Amino acid sequence: MKRFFYLAFLGLLLSCGKGGEAGEVAIAFAQNPLLLGAEAGVNDCGLICEGVWTASTKDAWVTVLTAEGKAGDPLKIRVTANNNAAERNATVTVKAGASGKVLQLVQAGNEGSGLVSESKVMLDTYGTATYISVRSEETWSFTAPEAPWLRLEKKGPQALGIEADVN
């Protein structure tokens, strides 16, 4: 009896994704919809495909970097930054043989409408005083670190002062 179930299960696994018609190829995605951050970047779409495939999109903010591939090849896309507060959606269509599958992309909205001049600040051991520019249409705030050797101070509506003690 166990052998029967094992053979039946194995047969089911082997038939999954082959499709009932000639030329059908299994296509799947590790995550669909694929959730993306608001920033620009290159993303692997988690494509799982048994054969030769092609990919395309009609959405201007998405570029398909690997427009074709074979079994095991990654599908990579580049997205532009979403500068709007609302999320946006796009699709990538993958075709393999007689099969086709649509990947839904959802890019998060940009929660803040401001920009800062530096995303990282390097501090030396001799003590540093510097600032970063902040451009925002809204009132902005910051969270001060709990390090007694580091001080942050709002310097008017467009700058954050950073001061570190000698180490």
Image (cartoon, rainbow, N blue to C red):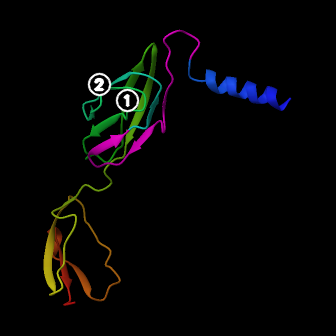
Residue sitting nearer the eye, 39 or 55:
55
Q: Do the residues under discs 1 and 2 have CB atoms within 8 angstroms?
A: yes
Q: Secondary structure at mark 1?
A: strand
CA gap, disc 1 to disc 2? Answer: 8 Å
Residue count near mark 2 (Cα–Cα under 10 Å), binned few <14, some 14–19, many ≥20: few
Q: Which mark is residue 120?
A: none
Which image quadrant: the C terminus?
Answer: bottom left
Residue count near mark 1 (Cα–Cα under 10 Å), binned few <14, some 14–19, many ≥20: some
Mark 1 highlights which residue? 91
The mark nearer the N terminus, 1 or 2, is: 2
Q: Residue 77: percent from the left, percent from the top?
A: 31, 36
Q: Which mark is residue 58?
A: 2
Residue 35 lies in the magenta-colored region: yes
Classify residue 17 as left or right of residue 132.
right
What residue span does the magenta drawing correspond to? 19-44
Classify residue 136 as left or right of residue 18.
left
Q: Residue 102: percent from the left, percent from the top?
A: 43, 26
Amino acid type, residue under disc 1 in the picture: Thr
Q: Residue 93: percent from the left, percent from the top?
A: 38, 24
Residue 36 vertical position relative to residue 75 in the rendered view, above or below: below
Q: In this view, which residue lies farthest toward the top? A: 22
Which image quadrant: the N terminus?
Answer: top right
**Residue at (25%, 84%) from the top-left corner?**
150
Q: Give the main secondary structure, helix, strand or loop, of the magenta stretch.
A: loop
Q: In this view, which residue lies farthest toward the front? A: 3
Residue 22 lies in the magenta-colored region: yes
Residue 165: name its quadrant. Answer: bottom left
